[in-house]
Amino acid sequence: IMAATKASKEQKYDRQLRLWGDHGQESLENAHVCLINATATGTEILKNLVLPGIGAFTIVDGHTVSGEDFLCTLQNRAQAATELLQELNSDVSGNFVEESPDKLLDNDPEFFHRFTIVIGVQLPESTCLRLGSVLWSASVPFLVCKSYGLIGYMRLAVQEHTVIESHPDNALEDLRLYQPFAEFKNHIQSYDLDSMDKKDHSHTPWIIIVAKHLEKWLSEHNCQPPKNYKEKEAFRQFIREGILKNENGVPEDEENFEEAIKNVNTALNPTKIPSAVEDLFNCEQCNITSQSPSFWVMLQAVKEFALKEGNGSLPVRGTIPDMIADSQKFINLQNVYREKAMQDAAAVSKHVERLLQSVGKVCCSHCIANCKHLCWRLGKNAFFLRVVRCRSLAEEYSVDSVNKDEITSSMDNPDSEMVFYLMFRAVDRFYQQHSRYPGVYNYQVEDDISKLKLCVNSLLQEYSLNVNIKDDYIHEFCRYGAAEPHTVAAFLGGSAAQEAIKIISHQFVPFNNTFIYNAMSQTSATLQL
Amino acid sequence: MKLLLFSLFREKKRRRVVELTEKMVVDGGSGRTCEWEGRWNHIKKFLERSGPFTHPDFEPSTESLQFMLETCKILVIGAGGLGCELLKDLGLSGFCNIHVVDMDTIDLSNLNRQFLFRPKDVGRPKADVAADFINKFHIIVCGLDSIVARRWMNGMLLSLLVYEDGVLDPGSIIPLIDGGTEGFKGNARVILPGMTACIDCTLELYPPQINFPMCTIASMPRLPEHCIEYVRVLLWPKETPFGDGVILDGDDPEHIQWVYQRSLERAADFHITGVTYRLTQAACATEVFKIASSAYIPLNNYMVFNDVDGLYTYTFEAERKENCSACSQVPLDLHFSPSSKLQEMLDYLTESASLQMKSPAITATVEGKNKTLYLQSVASIEQRTRPNLSKTLKELGLTDGQELAVADVTTPQTMLFRLCFTS
């Protein structure tokens, strides 16, 4: 039965396993997500987490169902939503708490400590800030989401989020052509292009071709590789001259040589440690203690590797792109890189063991095996390590630390998405003052415009923000009447769920720290507030 | 009910025609209602209130909601991951008259037959029946996973446009809303056939398809993908493991298992590692070769989404291509020398970035008679016309300036080209 379940899960989750792998899926299945307020937006977010199979969710919601919630039932909203969401995936366990978050914060704030991530939807400002403070201290990631009329809003508050597998879109290959490691050098020596027959010559991997020609070039140019356009052009020509010619002196059709020429531009870049990774090496978290999270232990291990076995370079990544070559030559070359990568990963792993030992943590054989595996994955991603640090909500809202520069420079364009952020803040004030949102009923719309404008002005004054908010936006936000149209909820639901998955799996890079979606113009912006 | 929900929110695609009822839709037309207080409050705020950012022609009224609830007919094509989301959002936004169609992808022959045709249509020209069916809808929304299918739909809508004295009748325009996703990327766009850029206008901007050269597949595999492709393309047709004429079904675990085992054997012969069941399944579902509308092109009427690193969107207006092969209404010129072989023309039609045809059938009027120069999809005709590929255009009796008609799965209408001889 276990095998059958695993097989059916593999099938069910096939499309997403291709994105984040079995280990990513495992982290999802161990996650417990808290959703506060099962509104259209909230349930969309949760649906998008339930379908891919998070372990468990808990909905916190004190509201009863209303006609607008698209349900013909007199239930508590938390319960109704839980039951329906459960139907989507029987692997997930759903729970609900019929309570407002404010009550929970009053009576049992540690309730929230158990969650992998807390997602708060349509929260009033005071609740949001209270909850934000509790979660920040407990290092529980907090994702705030709002759908208001045609505008969507997300705010991520997490102190430090580390990412080993960031899966960058366009990464340069790690070929070490400029300073080949010993095994690679030996492999290159094993080729003699001049004595090959035509078949072998035309099916030699371009990496070898570039390497051979580079060797010659270096010996003739004082060990300096081609650097500028002129030199690279000359190098390309040099390679072109290596193409076999037939009995009439006409160059043969050698696609592998054409590949070599095409790749000269990117293949010769020296293997430097990216500045982003250097910055991480300089973080104080690299001073390992017994409390250090594993990411920092591994980072310090990579740093030590770079200084020692790596001779100033990160571990070899171990992959090469496909290229014209016969199977044998390609596989042999691929193995050279693969074996080196495994060697480097093993060296990093030894550094990890040593570091752990130095802070009193002894490794059993299971740990060591796990460590080797993690370091192999680390080696493949060493060039792409990332750490995301968001400012807290407290910092964003405090007059002393508000990000004035970001706000005023964005508002140089009065129609930038920043205006919606400011309107959200003003609407929150309105709610605080009037215990309702502006323009919910038709008869309120006109009067609320001037009331909302007062809120806008008091907001700008309190933070000394010298910006102008057009009346049109104040009118528009009254028009919205706190409506939550489904299409905006769905878009936000997809975006928020994806960010939550990034937080849970520690794969891909989450946003930092405010995202605004404008459904009128179908545009968006990420702001750092 | 559970099955409806489950299938509605993703999972396997099967050929079916599904009409949404009850759970999410109010069937206003037939008088059957399931209304309750406050249901459309969210929508009403946008239809019944004026605002500073509305369209200049917008006038708040209660009529729009009635139109949406009772009259507006929407066709959703594709009931996979994207299609299900679309259905849900449309239903919850007040559209109550929704027709859903799902068909397996790549096997395009179904597209213009199974969902559009009914027994009563036997004897009528396919194009007429298709046109009748589609003409009933106000908006068409696509959640497809192949470019070929999109192009077909695009061509279909273009063929429905009515021109009076050279002026486009706006009443004949059926807006097409198209979307696609691939991993963490996606896009959405609005096409007003005859007015804005169509699918073919921006065809060149799609990323190139991954096609492995045959020599790699046949004799020099290097990657696990090459091994799987060998089994899929060469071994399967040869061994017909599940019977004569049985096509590989990417959704059938038995088929996948067979391909997987053979791929492992192939890989072992060449010391290649990395063939997995998952990779096999992906290749067989032709995911490798399907290119969902990708997020590489930033296109006003076209929005691109990528959340690999934070969230990135970009929106711009795709422009109509002057000599678009689908919507420009200008016959395209083909430039070849009279001594070019027909094969060269075939290669051009399939490889050109702006045409990207799949298996074009070329016919021409030669000496007053309609002659099929080459046709691939019917085995007997393919055999008969194959020798033409190595004949020159002159030998085939073609003349300068003559018209050539080309049919292909990428377009429901036959395309007309003008042959221009170069010296």
Image (tube, helix red, strand yellow):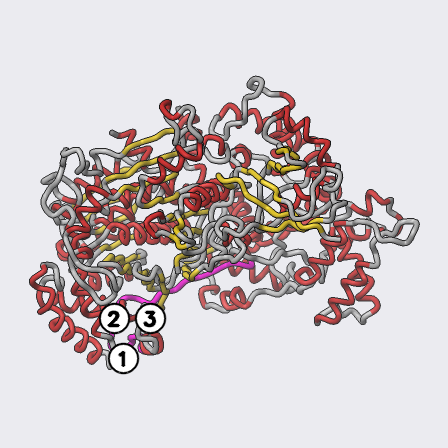
Residue at the (64%, 24%) spot, across then down: B380
Q: Residue furthest right?
A: A247
Residue A85: x, y in percent? 25, 39
Amino acid under label 1?
Val
- Disc 2 and disc 3: Cα gap in Å? 11 Å
Taking the spot 81% from the left edge, 65% from the top edge, the residue there is: A217
> Where is residue A274, by image quadrant?
bottom right
Is A518 magenta? The answer is no
Where is residue B152? Give x, y as percent.
47, 41
Residues under numbered marks 2 and 1 in contact, where contact means CB atoms less than 8 Å apart: yes
Q: Amino acid at mark 2?
A: Leu
Q: Secondary structure at mark 3?
A: loop
Query: Which secondary structure, mark 2?
Result: helix
N-term mark: 1 or 3: 3
Residue position for label 3: A416
Please report the bounds of the magenta region as a residue range.
A383-405
Q: Is residue A390 magenta?
A: yes
The amino acid type found where label 3 is placed reads: Ser
- The residue that mark 2 highlights is A422
Q: Chain of mark 3?
A: A
User: Can you see residue A257?
Assistant: yes
A433, above or below B36, in the image:
below
Q: Which of the two discs, 2 and 3, sits closer to the camera?
A: 3
Q: Is residue A49 visible?
A: no
